Structures are given as C-alpha cells and as structure tokens.
Amino acid sequence: MNQPSGKLEPADPTCESTSTKIRRCAVYARVSSSSRDDTPLSSIEAQIESCKAYVHSQKGMGWELIEPVYADDGYSGGSMNRPALQQLFQDMEDGKIDAVVIQRLDRICRNVLDICDIIPLFTIPGIALVSVNQSLDTESPQGRLMINMLTSFAQFEREVSGERTRDKISAARANGKWQHNGVPLGYYQDQHQELQVDAAEAAIVKDIFQRFSEAASVDALIIELADLGYRSKVRVSQQGNRAGGKPIDRNGLYRILNNRMYLGELFYRQEWHASKHQPIIEQGLWDQVHEILDRRARRKGVPTTEDRWIFFPLGNRLYWHDGRPYKMYESSNRNGLRYRYYQGAATPQEKATDTGPPTIRAADIHNAVIKHLLEQFENPQGLLDNLPGEWKDLPQFEPAHVIKYLTHIVEMWRDYWDPIKSSIIMDLVARVTIFQDQDQIEVILDLAGLKRMLTALLHERKKASKSSGSSNTRQYI
C-alpha cells in the first residue's frame, strides 16, 4: 500500500535481521615444487575445488567467491615471497576481500614467525582466514589458538626434516660421499658421488697456492692470475643455469686458500674430518701459505695505527690475576666516536657463567692506574725504600731530587697533554694485574724506566746549570 506524499513508512523490524551481509571470499592455493605427495589433495586443482565447494556451501551465509583464484604453483611454503600471495595481501589492503579460504594452514605458510607476521594482516582489518580441512576461523578465539598450535607443529616438522637431511649429508660425507652441487675447483664428482681429482684444475690450484707463497701482495697476485686466464669453477644447476667461470677475485682467492678439502678433508658435524678423496695440496705448502695469511691478517678490532700508544699506553702489560694477558681493541668509527677497551681471553665455561676476565673500558683502567701512580708520587718514600741497594747511592736517586721531580708530575698532571700522560704511563708502569673483585689492581712500577727518566732530567738540569753559569761568566767579564 502506497503512503501519502510527505509521510514516512514505518521500518520493518524484521528487515535487518533477514538481510544477509555479503562476504567476499578469496581462495588461495599453493603447491611446492619439491613436494612428492602424489595424493589428489596435494594437487593445486584439488585444493582449489575443495575451497570453492566450501564457499558455495556457505552461500546462505552471504559468502561469494571472488575470481580469479590466487594460486602459487611451484613455490615453497618456507618463503613468503610468492607472487599470488603478495597479490592477495595487496588486494586485502585495498579492501577487496572479506575472507580468505585455504585448504590447510600450511598452504599459506609453515613458519611460526611467518604466521605471527601475517595474522595481523587479517585481524586488524577484520578479514577472516578460514581453513577448510582444519575447521579453523581466525574470527574466533578458539580458531586463533588452534592456528598457532598447528603452525608450531608445522614448524617442528620442518626442523625435524631439516635435521634428518643434515644427518644424511653428514653420514654420506663420513663415508667419503659428496652430496652437494658446489664441488670446488680441482675436483669433479663421479657416478658414485665421490670426489675425484681433475688434473687440469688441480694444477691451477697448486699454482695458486705456490704463487701466493711468493707474491709480494694479494692485489698483484690477482692481476697475475687474471693474466694467466685462471677462472673460478663452472657449475651447471639442475635447471641448466650456468654459474662461475669468472676471473678469480680477492674473495674467491681466499676461499681457495682456506678450503681444507684440498688437504683431503670434508666438513660435517661442525668440524673438518679426514676423508677418502685425494688431497691436492701438501701439508707443508698449506702451512706455509697460512703462516703468511696469519702474518698479514688484520685482527678485527685490534688498533694498528702508529698513534695507538696514546690511547693504549698500557699496551700488553695488563693481566688477569691468573696471568692471562689482556689485548687492546678499538671499534670502528661510529658517528665520530671510537670505543676503546681491553679484553681478556675467557674459557667457554667462564663465558657461560660470566666469571672470566671482564672487558674493561680503556679510560677506566687508565684512570685507576693514574690514581695509583699519583698516590705513590705524592709520598715517594716507600718507592725510595724499595730501590735496589746499588741504586740508592746514584745521584739521580738522591731523595730530594726524586721527591722534587715526582711532586712536579703530581702538580702538573692536569695540565699535561694526553700524549705526555700516555708517555709517563708507558715509561713508569711495568705490569698491571686485575683481581677478581675488579675493585683492586696491582701496579708494578718499571724502576728501570724511572731511572731513565730521572737520569735524563738530571742531565738536562746539569746542562741548564752549565749554560746559565757560562752566561753569567760572560756577563761578568
């Protein structure tokens, strides 16, 4: 019945309840190229049909299928870099999707970290993730709990599978077998998966080792190898893609020189083991090359500049209480700052329990040593009492002379430049020992260094006195 113009028709209270909200549903399917599951459910077509059937079964709830289907054919679930999946995420962000339907959770991802990253992509905009076979829906708390649990099991299964693969490779290598595509220069893999020497390539490897032992520099050697036409090993993948065959650069050179396979060893179970394949390099030449490498190596963090003594005046004279030496370390330039510290070697057990030699800031230990020195210089009588008997009668150790000199150092310390302070520490400190409580240090003075300084000062004083006397005599004349 028509209402008169100007009057509103009363709303039907049942109208909203009987209307069904449309839910735009996208289907995602994936098959890994490495999958060996030949059951129907493993094919991408079966996944798509299963998901479509589920969406159609929910048609009464307002579910509508979005075409085309998002399908990644031949992509591993261990990587999120899949074209269809990325397009799905983009369409979700653009507001084109209300629900994503998958056959199983592992079709979208297997890694727990990945599922934790993508769940907010669904929950924040209110998009449901529905798994057909597992009856899961992220819109319910129970569904989210089950998703996290199932993903954890999928991650566990993946790690166990990887562990089995690693154990298989280790067992094969223990028997002299090579299960890897990256056969190094100098070898080839025969039909029994064993490494055999390639005579032509082995000659190149030997020549590289020999030339390195005689080369003046690495840069000159790389140029020489390029002139000789030496190239990295050519490898062809199962897909027929070629790699390698390029001139040997610095990284390639060091990989060759550090590859213990040339000694007849293989790496498995986290260490090198003797193997059955024939070595190419003799132990003597290997040791000669690595002695050169060790000698040329720039230790990470170890200062090498000529002015390092200014920042590390203790040098190698700092020790842990059991005699282990500390070494100097310096960080790279970080926003115009460098961090300098001393570090002692700790055993694995000490590292685990944090009971070994502590890492100490250079400035902290230097200030502690300076405080100890200045306290002795303010009252040097104890120092004079501990002098060797034959030194006590020397003019440079005359008490008044020593007290005057050391007192002058104390008074002028704040005005000294850093190089002068570092020079005094280097000359007067023989050894510093750090004890376990770290509140106590022992500073042993270098009496020979003190003698040199006092002797030089006495010589300068006599020279100055003589010059002053000559000047007075000329003036008097």
Image (cartoon, rainbow, N blue to C red):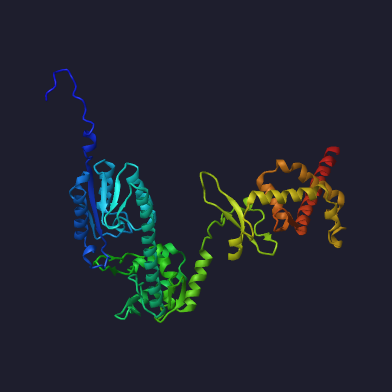
Number of numbered discs on residues: 0
Q: Nearer the viewer, residue 216 or 5?
A: 5
Identified at 21% across, 33% down, the residue is 15
Q: Residue furthest right?
A: 393
Q: Residue 257's x, y, as percent?
A: 43, 70
Identified at 37% across, 70% down, the residue is 165
Q: Residue 409's x, y, as percent?
A: 76, 46
Q: Quadrant of residue 47?
A: bottom left
Residue 310 visible? The answer is no
Horizontally, residue 202 falls left or right of residue 461, namely left
Q: Residue 251's x, y, as percent?
A: 40, 63
Q: Residue furthest top?
A: 6
- Vertical side of 1 occupied by 95: above or below: below
- Vertical side of 463 occupied by 38: above or below: below
Horizontally, residue 328 falls left or right of residue 441, namely left
Identified at 53% across, 66% down, the residue is 295
Q: Residue 162's x, y, as percent?
A: 38, 67
Q: Nearer the viewer, residue 55 or 249?
A: 55
Residue 363 visible? The answer is yes
Q: Quadrant of the C terminus?
A: top right
Q: Nearer the viewer, residue 214 or 42?
A: 42
Q: Quadrant of residue 386?
A: bottom right
Q: Quadrant of residue 279?
A: bottom left
- Vertical side of 329 occupied by 470: above or below: above
Q: Quadrant of the N terminus?
A: top left
Horizontally, residue 110 falls left or right of residue 52, namely right
